Amino acid sequence: MPVDHNHPQATHETVAKVDHQVHAGASLAILSGRPLQPNSGIPLDLNWVQEVRVNTSAVERRAQSQVARRTVKKDWQAAWLLRAISCMDLTTLSGDDTEDRVRRLCAKARQPVQQDLVHRLGIEELDLKVAAVCVYHLFVETALRALEGSGIRVAAVSTGFPAGLSPLAERVAEIRRSVEAGANEIDVVITRALVFGGRWQALYDEIAAFKQACGAAHMKVILASGDLLTLRNVARAGVVAMMAGADFIKTSTGKEPTNATLPVGLVMTRAIREYAQQTGMAVGFKAAGGIRTAKQSTDWLAMMKEELGQSWMRAELFRFGASGLLGDIERQLEHHVTGRYSADYRHPIA
């Protein structure tokens, strides 16, 4: 049964109210009325890590029930889809990437919705754009030039993406090169073998070294959940990443056989919530890989709202890693204003 979360403008208006409260209190987020600061990390607490447990069947039931219970329609849906666009890391990570492709992607990032749709939706004042463009290190400078003055951030995948198996010194040097090139955010991958072996101190030290190399750039730690085999492994790796100073924890590289799933998201967001409650610090969440439909984007937004609250429904704390998602959202927005679905080719991304 559809549940109306908000009135048509509520997704933007309510989040704007939260933004005002957050900025007024000089905090990154608010959880259960408590102001939260950016994550600066804590010493590794092995007892905390070892005590992590996940009831897999209960998590899967909860994720299934959310999809069935939480649906938004009509003006409500349009507002939520606009919010999804503003939280998007528009991404190209293909072996055949070129400077021209990256420039086209950046042009789309500046104007993610066609101008006629913007006018018909009456959202000119929103100045809608995506949160970031995510590329390989080789294209960081190209993206920076193409996005100059837009306020859109440039994210670079690093640390031997996607496998993360090159020597540690090379991975750290790769981060430093991207930061020196001007990247605002760095998406790093962990060594999965450290999780399988329960080598939590080694994992903590690895991520802490990445964080130091990032400097002022935001660090998103990719857990590669599809490779970690169990939800408990995902939860434990996420806790260690947050203790080591992660600004975001991210589901996947997008290259695993299984990428972002709602059960994985549920486990990771609850780990973020517990970490915030215990430390007073907020960590962001990025869902990446396999999210291709507008309906999926509203499912993820509903999860963020229910598990972490309004503060996390902003680009500062929530992202979609997406390449094909924007096209379907545009099609849904066009259907909203015309009553007709358009062909995919009318909404090119790159």
Image (cartoon, rainbow, N blue to C red):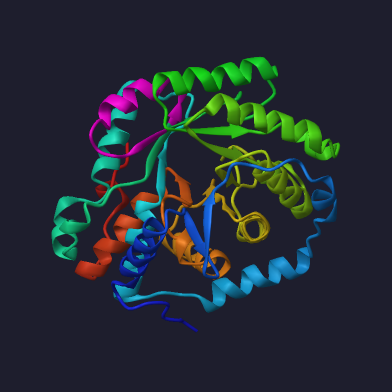
Front in this rendered view, residue 21 or 117: 21
Q: Position of residue 208 (x, y in %)?
A: 66, 31
Residue 37 x/y as whole percent? 52, 51
Give coordinates of residue 313: x percent, y percent: 44, 60
Look at the image and tell me whether residue 101 can be seen.
Answer: no
Residue most toward the bottom?
1
Instruction: Report the side of 350 relative to 47 (left or right).
Output: left
Estimate the x, y position of residue 107 in percent, counting from the top left.
25, 36
Picture quarter with the C terminus: top left
Q: In the visual, does 287 lie left or right of 241?
A: left
Lateral position of residue 237 relative to residue 340, left or right: right
Q: Is residue 136 magenta?
A: yes
Seen in the picture, residue 52 relative to 6 is either above or below; the reply is above
- Which sits in the foreground, 248 or 295? 248
Q: Is residue 229 left or right of residue 266?
A: right
Q: Which residues are magenta?
A: 135-154
Image label count: 0
Q: Residue at x 83, y 35 (%)?
A: 199
Asked if residue 195 lies in the magenta stretch, the reply is no
Residue 220 is drawn in which quadrant? top right
Query: Seen from this angle, which residue lies furthest front?
Result: 25
User: Dividing the picture into quarters, in which one does residue 5 lie?
Assistant: bottom left
Q: Is residue 166 above or below residue 104?
A: above
Please tell me whether residue 172 is drawn above or below residue 72 in the rendered image.
above
Q: Residue at x 51, y 28 (%)?
A: 215
One can see residue 319 in this view: yes
- Tell me the quarter of the picture where residue 227 sits: top right
Identified at 27% across, 25% down, the residue is 145
